[in-house]
Image (cartoon, coloured by chain):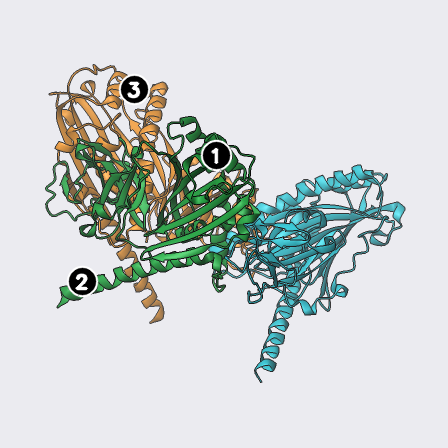
Chain colours: A orange, B cyan, C green
Amino acid sequence: MFVKNAWYVASRIEDIAEKPLARTICNEKMVFYRAKENKVAAVEDFCPHRGAPLSLGFVENGELVCGYHGLVMGQDGKVISMPSQRVRGFPCNKTYATIEKYGFVWVWPGDQSLATEAQLPALEWADNPEWAYDGGLFHINCDYKLMIDNLMDLTHETYVHSSSIGQKEIDDALPKTLIEGDKVITERFMENVEAPPFWKMALRGNQLADDVLVDRWQRCHFFAPSNVHIEVGVAHAGKGGYQAEPQNKVSSIVVDFITPETETSHWYFWGMARNFQAQNHELTQQIKAGQNTIFSEDLDMLEQQQQNILDHPNRKLLMLNIDAGGVQSRKVIDRLIEKEKTNTQHISHLNIS
Amino acid sequence: MFVKNAWYVASRIEDIAEKPLARTICNEKMVFYRAKENKVAAVEDFCPHRGAPLSLGFVENGELVCGYHGLVMGQDGKVISMPSQRVRGFPCNKTYATIEKYGFVWVWPGDQSLATEAQLPALEWADNPEWAYDGGLFHINCDYKLMIDNLMDLTHETYVHSSSIGQKEIDDALPKTLIEGDKVITERFMENVEAPPFWKMALRGNQLADDVLVDRWQRCHFFAPSNVHIEVGVAHAGKGGYQAEPQNKVSSIVVDFITPETETSHWYFWGMARNFQAQNHELTQQIKAGQNTIFSEDLDMLEQQQQNILDHPNRKLLMLNIDAGGVQSRKVIDRLIEKEKTNTQHISHLNIS
Amino acid sequence: MFVKNAWYVASRIEDIAEKPLARTICNEKMVFYRAKENKVAAVEDFCPHRGAPLSLGFVENGELVCGYHGLVMGQDGKVISMPSQRVRGFPCNKTYATIEKYGFVWVWPGDQSLATEAQLPALEWADNPEWAYDGGLFHINCDYKLMIDNLMDLTHETYVHSSSIGQKEIDDALPKTLIEGDKVITERFMENVEAPPFWKMALRGNQLADDVLVDRWQRCHFFAPSNVHIEVGVAHAGKGGYQAEPQNKVSSIVVDFITPETETSHWYFWGMARNFQAQNHELTQQIKAGQNTIFSEDLDMLEQQQQNILDHPNRKLLMLNIDAGGVQSRKVIDRLIEKEKTNTQHISHLNIS
């Protein structure tokens, strides 16, 4: 079950160029391509003629042509033409609302009459010269909600990422979880600790001493349907921590867009946005490489956790205080899914009466 | 569901030599081997002793010996012997009628009392010194009926084979479909067109000019249970087209024997027979290599089409005029399957009363 | 269905070192590790917190730590601690009795209150300086009972191992099967035969002539739950055969510990123990290499036999005289499984009343 009436990141903007791109999102097989005026369109990846994937075709004059027998599909899901055929009676394909913004292509798998640009998240770091951003994409064979759990409970850093961002003090600093409507925040503050290797690298990158104690923070923000952005940073100890002046700290936002593929797989768009040394591209690449290494460490754990849960269908999982971020985020998801169901029933009811 | 009482190509003759060959045809696991007098025999690939595949065994004095404990299987499905055992009460294996003809081993998966050589297709090009033939074999993960559709609707050439045999004019020349009993013919004629690259190569191969306009034809013959042979050719324009004299045309037969393996996989024996330059072996190899390249282009499309259809169980496929060849061929198959069912019920009824 | 209240070989002792080892035995996912005092412990491979496999974690001071969030699992299945958590109410994991003996780690997948060291088999050759032993481990995708069949009916040697230990005379010497409680013995004696290549090598290894006729024997011992040890050997002909004096024979024990993984896969611990030239390590390696080659020949046959049986669910297998060893061994297994079921029902009944 997925929240369908919401924006998900489908790809980076540059991933959709001349060739159509096939991607399954929330169990819907979609094909993305550049339609008229170079705008991204998304339709069901199924040719109404003989069922070939339209993504094996090509784009001609901004129109998607099936690579099997030349049916031309419109971005409104109506068949435009087919050699020597009258196509008026052909069945239509489902289409999906899309927006290109912040460097990403966003897709709305549900009822596109409900999709508005205003519902996109506001990302202060995107398209902003004072910030630098870069990241990557993983395909992961586990429920997207296990990834949300992972990111909303950073105690795993001590164990999974012990050589880069983990440190024992994370275990000792209990997180606090706040709920604001459909948003969940889990925050943790550590004082007078030694910076772990990744943060020493970042301190040096911002021309700060890396051999002094620091105050460290992690503020995980879940926002519906399934994205997690984490404010992270360290300040030289005693300079105000999270509130410290820019010259005493180094901070950034871990940017995670989590897009469900099926019930047990998802697309994981990860990255980091920072507002120090924004023009230092070498530092950007260094951070991206470090993040790539760190996030790779989660893959095996998440996929094997998924398999283990499937193998033990009768075992319940615990929900501890450290899990509050994930638990509350799942509650938001469940509530939104329930709301969509009720609305759909309501609409059905109206139609019938 | 398959037509069982029919001849299917099981392999090329040379594929069955010293070692037994395992092949699943119409969902029946068979083992082929050279029995007495070097004749090909086919029995169920299951040792009645402990279930080992007989195809892992060996042939000794024209008898198939199980490679596990030495049971000797007769080509009549009766166990001949087993070391230190009386085998009279052993259960029998199913056996299959086979014929070696036209360079192929043919098998009859159904009731072998109904199998006669007369039911083999008559192939004028085979074993005929005025003709040359060569081809290859693909294993394809899709319903064999999707391959029949593919071959009975050559409008796909324009899209799938655009750089070799495809050309826009195919789309414009509507095909005509004729039904003659269990045979279906779909034919298309194009006049005053430029020959596509494959045919320019063939014109040169037959010492004809390749820089003049041609008349082109495609006549697809479906014959039960699941084979498609296509008369193809080009003649210098205005010389009579399909009816042109030999010195003005180049023509051949695309030979496709399609043998179902399971409901979603098949063996595809493809080849080309031609009656010009029949002794030019270099040309034969050139044509085979070209065909191999062209037919490989269909593989991904067919396998992904199959997967897409399985993923969309509720979507119906369209049946357009261009699909008439495939649609009519499927009707023949359905009718033959229905007939076999009725006959079987009739036999059951007789047995019971 | 498996006999659960029994000792199975889980691994060689040296396979469990610093890192935890995941192994599924009788459908139970277990993690093995070195607990306090270096003793091997085994618990369910499932973290009660969020379902991660504990085998991805590490051992610290003899305690198993989950690699995801640091939960510390006790070898009694009770959670010992977790950073910043009270763990008293946490659900327990199943644990498994283990023993290290004879170079192996043994595990008891069932009710560990019934497990006693006395129920381990007595192995005269193990930890005995007059004997040499070495062997290997295969993972095989077939029912462990097919492997028991294989080892209790050595007529397959003539076919599967024709170039090493097979010989035609095996087929002619009918085996005799004896049943002693939960033990099954199948024995076969051949007189005045030529030694096959493996045994010629062994004769030379024991400094005996290899160019004279021999008497050969095979005595297969099945003991519950699923292990087969085979006394094998050859003596110079006429010197008493199985009863011959040591200076006239070369003999050894083929040691097979067969541990079910799932219904269609198992772990196969094979080896050979001998009491001649026990200190000749080069000979030990030579025998192990030979055995490795020979036993590899069974793999493909067993896995394809399994697949063929699954593909033919309605076909029954034969039970011939040569199969008596396997048939009787399966009867023992069935009887023990039945007994466990009855006992469990009895216990349930007592609990209810």
Q: Which residue is mark 1?
A: C202
Say few, some or many: other residues with alpha carbon within 10 Å of mark 1 (under 14 / 14 to 19 / 20 or more).
many
Left or right of C188? Residue A247 is left
Image point (52%, 61%), residue name: B316
Residue A122 on image: x %, y %: 29, 38
Q: Nearer the observer, disc 3 or disc 1?
A: 1
Report if residue B154 is visible in the image. Answer: yes
| Chain to which the residue tagged by mark 1 belongs | C
Q: Nearer the viewer, mark 2 or mark 1?
A: 1
- Are marks 3 and 1 in one subunit? no
Give, as a three-letter code, the residue at label 1.
Ala
Query: In this figure, which residue is indicated by the disc labeled 2?
Result: C347
Residue C95 vs residue A53: left or right?
Answer: left
- The N terminus of chain A: image quadrant: bottom left
Which of the chains bears the disc numbered 3?
A
Q: Residue at x 89, y 50 (%)?
A: B245
Mark 1 element type: helix
Q: Label 3: which residue?
A: A277
**Label 2: element kind:** helix
